[in-house]
Image (tube, grey):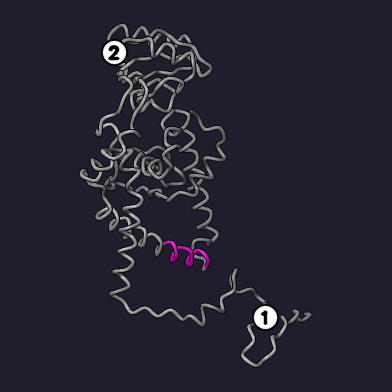
């Protein structure tokens, strides 16, 4: 999977939370934080973009887009995006945009939203966890939902050329790790996971791939398989017959089914508790006078009791 349009990725990255670049300090090595090692990936007019910045940016992306930034091409696109954004930030500072009242107002609003989000996240995560007992109870009452056809688990290495596939096949026969070669060479989104595609049944993959994968013995590696996406080498890592899946296999599904309602319940109780501890007065009369789409400049004001409504006044000529 690759970025199809740099502009689309740039727009996305410009909209996510900014990690910020760091100014280099002569003779001083700043303390590094995050999963990286503080390695400088790019310099932009004296500011640096490090691997920590890259990983923070990557973590802020929607899950379906993260694999795009794990390929060599995707990493270059991401860095280019971060460089362009830093250049925009620097130019905006020169133009005084960062000091404008509009930006200050939006930053204050954003600060409130971030604080509220952090507070709710903490409270809901603390009290909204689905317990093992709740999952067991749901599983017992809904076993029919967790039946599945025969499935296999497989990993693959996908490359563009047959020559590269043959070289990888040779390395595998020489004892090289399938998972490590997948991480290093595969152009598929599953590469960071060693090529693991998880469990799947028939009619889930393209026919050429599926025929070979289901025909392998557990632990066996295929030869080179050509499809419309390139050249694959497939390793079958597991198999399970048709029938009900175990609780351990479906815990994540059960949690996803139960958590929204439980979190909503926690949120509802939290709202009620906060209101009980506070003095809140909603001005109903003022609320009723609010326009449906907000107050509009030049709109007529509601008439007072006993008075005729006044039409909006036309703008005076200059």
Taking the spot 54% from the left edge, 78% from the top edge, the residue there is: 288
State how many labels appear. Answer: 2
Taking the spot 26% from the left edge, 47% from the top edge, the residue there is: 130
Image-based side of 134 in relation to 52, left or right: left
- The Cα–Cα distance between marks 2 and 1, rounded to whole angstroms, is 77 Å
Q: Is residue 107 above or below residue 59?
A: below
Helix, strand or loop status at disc 2: loop
Q: Residue 242 is drawn in which quadrant?
A: top left
Question: Which of the labelled discs sits on residue 219, or is there none?
Answer: 2
Residue 290 image position (x, y, % from top left)? 56, 76
- Front residue of 32/120: it is 120
- Front residue of 114/248: it is 248
Q: Is there CB contact under 8 Å for labels 2 and 1?
A: no
Residue farthest bottom in this picture: 306
For the stretch drawn in magenta, the main secondary structure is: helix
| Residue 183 appears in the rendering | no
| Residue 317 appears in the rendering | yes
Q: Is residue 127 above or below residue 300?
A: above
Is residue 96 found inside the magenta-colored segment of the image? no
Taking the spot 31% from the left edge, 40% from the top edge, the residue there is: 254
- Front residue of 155/35: it is 155
2 or 1: tag closer to the N-terminus: 2
| Mark 1 surroundings within 10 Å by alpha-carbon count, few (fewer than 14), some (14 through 19), many (20 or more) | few
Q: Check the picture and name the quadrant holding the C terminus.
A: bottom right
Residue farthest left in this picture: 133
Residue 277 image position (x, y, % from top left)? 28, 75
Residue 181 image position (x, y, % from top left)? 34, 18
Which residue carries the number 1 mark? Answer: 300
Residue 251 image position (x, y, % from top left)? 28, 37
Region rendered in magenta: 102-110
Is residue 105 found inside the magenta-colored segment of the image? yes
| Mark 2 surroundings within 10 Å by alpha-carbon count, few (fewer than 14), some (14 through 19), many (20 or more) | few
């Amino acid at each position: 999977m690759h970025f199809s349009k740099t502009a689309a990725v740039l727009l996305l990255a410009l909209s996510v939370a900014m990690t910020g670049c760091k100014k280099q300090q002569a003779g001083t090595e700043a303390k590094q934080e995050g999963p990286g090692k503080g390695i400088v990936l790019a310099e932009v007019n004296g500011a640096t973009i490090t691997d920590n910045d890259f990983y923070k940016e990557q973590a802020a992306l929607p899950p379906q887009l993260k694999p795009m930034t794990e390929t060599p091409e995707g990493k270059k696109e991401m860095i280019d995006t971060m460089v362009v954004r830093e250049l925009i930030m620097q130019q905006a500072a020169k133009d005084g945009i960062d000091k404008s009242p509009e930006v200050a107002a939006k930053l204050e609003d954003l600060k409130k939203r971030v604080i509220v989000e952090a507070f709710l996240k903490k409270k809901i995560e603390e009290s909204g966890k689905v317990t093992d007992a709740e999952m067991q109870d749901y599983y017992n009452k809904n076993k029919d939902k967790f039946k599945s056809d025969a499935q296999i688990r497989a990993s693959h290495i996908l490359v563009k050329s047959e020559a590269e596939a043959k070289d990888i096949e040779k390395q595998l026969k020489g004892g090289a790790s399938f998972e490590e070669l997948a991480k290093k060479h595969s152009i598929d989104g599953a590469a960071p996971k060693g090529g693991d595609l998880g469990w799947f049944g028939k009619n889930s993959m393209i026919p050429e791939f599926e025929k070979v994968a289901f025909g392998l013995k557990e632990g066996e590696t295929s030869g080179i398989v050509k499809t419309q996406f390139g050249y694959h080498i497939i390793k079958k890592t597991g198999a399970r017959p048709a029938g009900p899946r175990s609780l351990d296999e479906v815990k994540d599904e059960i949690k996803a089914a139960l958590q929204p309602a439980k979190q909503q319940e926690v949120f509802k109780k939290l709202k009620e508790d906060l209101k009980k501890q506070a003095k809140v007065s909603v001005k109903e009369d003022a609320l009723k006078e609010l326009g449906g789409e907000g107050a509009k400049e030049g709109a007529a004001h509601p008439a007072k009791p006993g008075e005729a409504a006044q039409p909006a006044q036309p703008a005076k000529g200059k």
